[in-house]
């Protein structure tokens, strides 16, 4: 599994928005791009995707800019990742590997598909528990802290 640039920088843009828009201020496209050292064009693309997913609001005009559409504690990482790229394993992905046939020859008895579906389910269950606020406040890795605090220790 790879984390795409769109997922990485999209999440980073959301974190910058949360930092830059304290007290309901607006953040400019330029400020976000500069803080993340990415181009304004790429930043605009990411913010458009996040706006379409109702994670970001934009205000037009001379004093316009961007802000989160809801509080950081109400934005969960699973919805961010889904907005930026969809699920890690989509149920129709088996259509991508048909070999020489029109559909996969293992479609009715695939042991591999169940592995990817299970991993995706576990990952998204974990991401459903971590918010932007967790990432903003935690000096240690938020996922590591979550696993340590909330998941049972392995036997």
Image: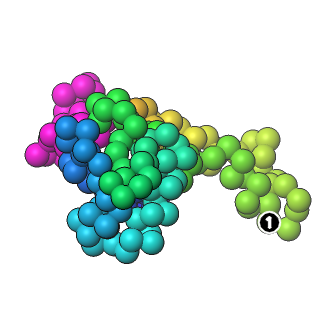
Residue 58 visible: yes
Q: Residue furthest front?
A: 62
Q: Give the range drawn in magenta.
A: 131-155
Q: Which of 110 and 80 is in front in this view?
A: 80
Q: Which residue lies furthest to the right in this view?
A: 102
Which image quarter holds the C terminus? top left
Against 145, is 35 above or below? below
Q: Residue furthest left?
A: 139
| In the image, residue 107 lies in the stretch drawn in magenta | no
**In the drawing, does residue 6 fall left or right of residue 134?**
right
**In the drawing, does residue 74 fall left or right of residue 58?**
left
Quadrant hosting residue 41: bottom left
Q: Nearer the viewer, residue 46 or 149?
A: 46
Quadrant hosting residue 67: top left
**In the drawing, does residue 83 fall left or right of residue 123?**
right
Q: Mark 1 points at which residue?
A: 99
Against 129, is 47 above or below? below
Q: Which residue is drawn at 88% across and 62% down?
A: 101
Q: Nearer the viewer, residue 30 or 146?
A: 30
Residue 43 rendering spot, x and y as whole percentages: 40, 65
Q: Residues within 10 Å of mark 1 (few under 14, many from 20)?
A: few
**In the drawing, does residue 86 fall left or right of residue 7?**
right
Residue 154 visible: no
Q: Residue at x 20, y 41 (%)?
A: 22
Residue 120 rendering spot, x and y as whole percentages: 51, 42
Q: Which residue is drawn at 19% across and 38% down?
A: 23
The chief SS type of the magenta part is: helix
Q: Which residue is drawn at 50% across and 55% down?
A: 48
Residue 78 rendering spot, x and y as whole percentages: 44, 39
Against 93, is 29 above or below? below
């Amino acid at each position: 599994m790879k984390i795409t640039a769109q997922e990485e920088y999209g999440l980073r843009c959301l974190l910058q928005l949360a930092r830059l828009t304290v007290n309901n201020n607006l953040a400019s496209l330029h400020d976000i791009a500069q803080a993340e050292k990415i181009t304004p064009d790429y930043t605009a693309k990411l913010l458009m995707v996040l706006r379409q997913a109702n994670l970001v609001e934009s205000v037009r005009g001379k004093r316009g800019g961007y802000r989160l559409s809801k509080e950081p504690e109400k934005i969960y990482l699973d919805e961010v990742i889904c907005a930026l790229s969809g699920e890690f394993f989509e149920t129709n992905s088996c259509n991508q590997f048909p070999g020489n046939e029109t559909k996969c020859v293992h479609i009715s008895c695939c042991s591999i598909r169940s592995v990817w579906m299970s991993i995706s389910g576990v990952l998204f269950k974990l991401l459903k528990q971590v918010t932007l606020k967790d990432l903003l406040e935690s000096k240690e890795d938020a996922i590591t802290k979550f696993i340590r605090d909330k998941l049972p220790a392995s036997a």
